């Protein structure tokens, strides 16, 4: 029987379907199926065929793309970003060069708090336009699903403004977004002496956030000078009771034990984990809490000690990777660059890296059934890369290897062109 499709990709050099029944943990992260001389058929925004080119004789297509031996993968998933914010922090680079630590800049009212000031001043329209620009750029780099956090308001009004902008982006931007409430991102100057009261104010927002469907996850920055493990545990426990899934900024700078706490609360993910203890790693493996590693942040903070990805994988942890795109510690939309840093500094293999930015990243944001895999019946989020094989993306670094991005079956980005 002849099958009619809207779009057919043929002559794919290496096709990575990334199909997996669940997240890939530990040694299973090394698994990678490669279809050579592959083809993908798309109809009504959905994948209807994945296989080899010689099997497509009875498929008719409105449009055919000859992939000329290129690599084709699912759209990338970026499971940790702070895309909605006002202003920027380029002035902090000189402070960093002078050796002023990230947490010291924050303590002096800069860092996150300076972004809070700019975000409070910005209108909803301004925030929407700015975030939309960054999301467009992410898409041109091959990302088709993104998690986005609030946390630059630190008061009910501005947190709501950020969450509403995220919801509007969810509804109108081509990117798929998953929203996280990070009201507990820093202690605002007004509550310096009373962080617990501040956390209560943030908790008081949860019913409205739930009712208006403004966030699926609740996150907290557990760090020296920000929130303690005890405060974080009590806060997250209450969020969990209200039906939210949990994420935690854990052990990013100082090893406080946020990793163990994340695992014991059954968090969906624990993120950063540079200072995670042996015990913390063991607990992640046991609980299935996904480790979202952000090596671009470690690199950008000028640190030399990276998260212990090798130990995590050897112990059976499910590892994912994200940009942590934010105006302070990781101003980049480029997940391909993070893949290179993961190879060089986390010593992750190319196979582990591809699992980390597709199937595992999707599971880290509760989208395991939707994103991160190219399979019949799933939405057609596909990237054609200007690369002959999957090893090539982490290898040739700092540039954009995207040839074509397809989102829900439609071409939404094409490679940079020189205009004569
Ligand atoms: O704006 O600095 N680490 N939060 C926790 C951040 C980095 C974002 C920022
Ligand atoms: Zn973050």
Image: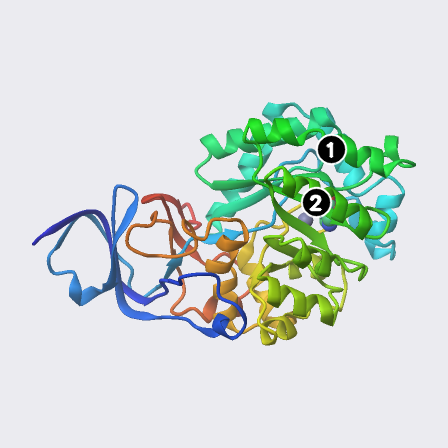
Q: Position of residue 159 (x, y in %)?
A: 68, 30
How is the rendered protein coloured? rainbow
Q: Residue at x 53, y 49 (%)?
A: 365
Q: Are dots 2 and 1 in contact, CB under 8 Å?
A: no
Q: Residue at x 86, y 48 (%)?
A: 225
| Residue 227 horizontal side relative to residue 11, left or right | right
As drawn, the label of residue 202 is 1
Whether residue 398 is visible = no
Residue 349: image x %, image y %?
A: 53, 74
Alpha-carbon span between mark 2 and mark 1: 11 Å
Q: Which residue is mark 2?
A: 236
Q: CB at mark 2 closer than 8 A to ligand 2?
A: no
Looking at the picture, how far across and down is residue 167, in whole percent? 53, 31
Q: Is residue 153 above or below residue 275?
A: above
Q: Residue at x 59, y 39 (%)?
A: 243
Q: Of residues 406 and 362, which is closer to you in this image? A: 362
Dot 1 crowding, Cα within 10 Å, few <14, some 14–19, many 20+: some
Name the spot of residue 198 as percent of width and height, x first: 81, 34
2 or 1: tag closer to the N-terminus: 1
Q: Which of the 4 image quadrants contains residue 172?
A: top left
């Amino acid at each position: 029987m002849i099958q009619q499709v809207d779009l057919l990709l043929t002559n794919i050099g290496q096709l990575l379907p990334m199909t997996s029944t669940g997240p890939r943990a530990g040694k299973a992260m090394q698994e990678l199926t490669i279809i050579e001389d592959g083809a993908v058929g798309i109809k009504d925004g959905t994948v209807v065929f994945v296989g080899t080119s010689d099997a497509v004789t009875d498929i008719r297509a409105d449009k055919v793309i000859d992939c000329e031996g290129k690599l084709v993968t699912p759209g990338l998933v970026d499971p940790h970003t702070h895309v909605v914010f006002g202003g920027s922090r380029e002035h902090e680079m000189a402070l960093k060069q002078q050796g002023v630590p990230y947490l010291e800049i924050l303590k002096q009212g800069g860092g996150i708090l300076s972004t809070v000031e700019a975000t409070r001043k910005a209108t909803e329209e301004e925030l929407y336009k700015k975030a939309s620009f960054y999301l467009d750029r992410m898409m041109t780099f091959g990302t088709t699903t993104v998690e986005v956090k609030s946390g630059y308001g630190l008061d009910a009004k501005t947190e709501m403004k950020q969450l509403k902008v995220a919801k509007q982006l969810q509804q109108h931007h081509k990117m798929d977004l998953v929203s996280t409430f990070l009201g507990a991102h820093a202690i605002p100057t007004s509550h310096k002496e009373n962080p617990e009261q501040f956390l209560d104010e943030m908790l008081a927002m949860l019913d409205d956030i739930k009712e208006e469907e403004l966030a699926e996850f609740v996150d907290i920055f557990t760090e020296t000078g920000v929130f303690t493990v005890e405060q974080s545990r009590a806060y997250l426990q209450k969020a969990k009771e209200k039906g939210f899934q949990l994420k935690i900024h854990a052990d990013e700078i100082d090893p406080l034990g946020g990793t163990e706490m994340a695992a014991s609360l059954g968090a969906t993910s624990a993120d950063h984990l540079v200072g995670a203890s042996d015990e913390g790693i063991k607990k992640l493996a046991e609980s299935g809490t996904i480790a979202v590693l952000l090596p671009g942040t470690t690199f950008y903070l000028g640190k030399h000690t990276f998260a212990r990805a090798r130990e995590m994988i050897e112990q059976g942890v499910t590892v994912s990777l994200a940009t942590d795109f934010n105006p302070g510690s990781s101003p980049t939309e480029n997940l391909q660059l993070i893949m290179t840093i993961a190879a060089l500094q986390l010593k992750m293999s190319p196979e582990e890296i591809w699992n980390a930015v597709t199937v595992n990243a999707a599971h880290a944001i509760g989208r395991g059934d939707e994103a991160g895999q190219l399979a019949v019946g799933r939405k057609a989020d596909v990237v054609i890369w200007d690369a002959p094989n999957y090893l090539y993306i982490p290898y040739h670094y700092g540039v954009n290897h995207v040839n074509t991005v397809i989102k829900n079956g439609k071409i939404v980005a094409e490679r940079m062109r020189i205009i004569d």
